[in-house]
Image: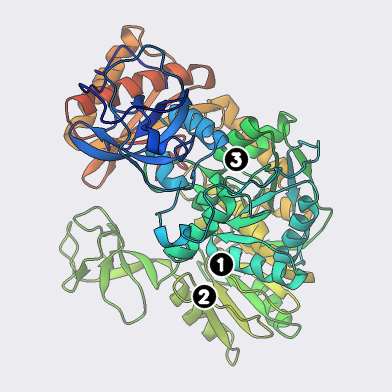
Amino acid sequence: MARSGLRLKAELIAKVSEPPSGHDSLAQVWVDTGVYHLDQEYSYLIPGDLDSIVTIGSFVVVPFNGRELSAVVTHRGPLMGQANLKTVIKSQSPIPLLNYEQISLIRVLSEKYLCHPFDLIRSIVPQRVATSEKSRNSFVDRPVPTRSARNKNSYLQLPPHRNRQVLIAAKLVELLSDGPTLALFPDVREVQAVSRELDALGVKYTRYDSSQNRSDHYSSYLDIVQGLAQLVIGTRSSVFAPLKGLANIVIYDEGSEHYYERRTPGWNAREIAIARSGIEKVSLTFVGYSPSLEICRLIEMKEVNYRKSNSRLKVNDFEQAFGELLPSQALSIVKKSLADGPVLFVAPAKGWAHAIRCSRCKTLSKCKCGGNFEIKSEKSSISCNHCGVVNQQWKCTWCENHTYSLVGRGIERHAHEIGKLLPGVVIKNSTADNPLTDQIASGAVISTASMAPVAQSGYSAVVFLEGNRINNQPDMRAQERMRELYFGHSALSCRGGNILLIQDSGNPIVTALRIWNPMPVLERELAERADLDLPPFSHSVELTMLKDEVTRFKNALLKAQDEGRLPREMRILGPIVKGESSSLVLLSTLADAQSVNLLIHEFMRRRSLTKKVLPSLRIDPYSLSR
């Protein structure tokens, strides 16, 4: 990472306890200090008894500022006149847990995300389980698999009416002919579904995801490190899996928020895969129904080849003239469709009502923490959707009225109302808390986003309830999520099935679904983003800190712009209040990204040096307003 004038004293010791052996007795290491500004590489001597054990990627213990800390070896080389160096104390694992390519990747990503290398290493290397190493050789001399010369990037649009897991499994088998392949999925449910299809095909693969227990998770990682895996499937952190001779990375639903790491530094799996592609020269295959704006931009730049599915659907939209859940025309189609097979209703939210307001003055009711009060089920009490506090004696904080009205139906309330509209029809709910896993043969299913079960022969109708709530979310990703939701769930319909959108007419998503092509809508939104210099045509940095600090920091940024230390074109959005904290969002051109990052990195280092609390930092976050 580029430095900005700050220098730290080298770690010194009077003499080493044991003479080094061999020519490459110097080790460069990253030390897990837990201190932001101590992120550079340090030099240590390798004692003779560790000479044959310690190699690049080895985890070792080193003395550091009076403590014994974990470190990873990034380089071995000869002494070049260095004196008074400390000595590596011991090796933590007989197996090198990182390889050359991973270390190169960590260097690139540490600079991109302005983070300590160990912030990334914690995402890459799972918690060690020593017993998993006992039956293994320290070094497994597996030849690097032969790779195809092909190195192409593509977006493969999935067709409707087909089981996507079957299609993805077949694609993975096809790509294996090019060489080792890594496949990423947004959640464990999708990993499990694809696993079943691979098992049915008799394909050998290695699962590597967060649902595994510690021992299995670590064993899977060791298999990958030692070249024993040819096909790896997993979730977000699997993007770092060090397959030898990696040829392909496949990502399903690459725009999903699940691919954004929650912990510092908030990296994104799609961006990690793109970085790996540049370092390791692997092919990227994005699979899904509707690409993100980031991938759409790469498609326009001819860096990703878009492979469209040629399909057409029966799609109609219906307006809610009087606020009714299902307009009469839509209800008529639903009743006819139930005679042909199951019907899927897609609800925008779980619970009974996701907000309440005063029945007299119409003020939206909020908790002291800033969260909305909600009602999770028909008989539950009012509670905060943020801190969970229960409000047994509710009253309006503005006019002190004690009666409220419900705002925004949840899935429980939808089920209640649909049950009245469709008497005698069996209705099942599917949510993240209570997912349906069996295939559906008849009746109606009400599902929240991404939780719809598969129907045996496809759904005879798919109904998107309260589409205006989905379309009008105050978030820059709202339209992207809408496309993913509509295309992904419409794909579950049977051939000739009805797609019903309960929303205002005139939305271009209707035509996009009919011709099964989101690109015209994407290209229009991309052009609007370009005109406004918004992501993905700009670089964004989000810093979250205490409210009393954010104003001072904003003034300091404005001063830096006046003095020419920051680009004058950079926009500062906020403060955006988030409970007890506030955020600033910095938007700059892609050309100015490096200069902005350097200043923010300098700011973070200085706070670390003075032992101040560090702000939460996100580079190119999922959303600028969530």
Report how far apart the C-alphas of labels 2 and 3 lie in the structure: 30 Å
**Between discs 2 and 3, the one toward the N terminus:** 3
Mark 1 touching mark 2, by CB under 8 A? yes
The residue mark sitting in front, 1 or 2, is 1
Marks 3/1 in contact by CB < 8 Å: the verdict is no
**Mark 1 → mark 2, Cα distance in angstroms:** 10 Å
**Mark 2 burial class by Cα count in 10 Å: few <14, some 14-19, many 20+:** some
**Helix or strand or loop: what does disc 1 sit on?**
helix
Amino acid under disc 1: Arg
Q: Residue 300 at x, y = what percent?
A: 72, 31
Q: Mark 3 points at which residue?
A: 273
Whether residue 112 can be seen here: no
Mark 3 lies on a secondary structure that is: helix
Residue 423 drawn at (x, y percent): 57, 90
Q: Residue furthest right?
A: 310
Element at label 2: loop
Q: Where is residue 321 in the image (x, y as percent from the top left)?
A: 56, 64
Asked if residue 368 lies left or right of residue 415, the reply is left
Question: Residue type at mark 2?
Answer: Pro
Instruction: Please tell me in which quadrant of the rendered image residue 161 appears.
Output: bottom right
Q: How many residues crowd mark 3 within 10 Å: few (<14), some (14–19), many (20+)?
A: many
In this rendering, the answer to whether 64 lies above or below 475 is: above
Residue on which the image places disc 1? 189
Residue sitting at 72 percent across and 31 percent down? Answer: 303
The label shown at residue 449 is none
Task: Tell me the residue that label 2 is attached to.
Answer: 435
In the visual, does 214 lie left or right of 253? left
Along the line of sight, which residue is nearer the eye, 380 or 323? 380
Q: How far apart in space, not on screen, are marks 3 and 1 (Cα)?
A: 21 Å
Decide if residue 398 is in sight here: yes
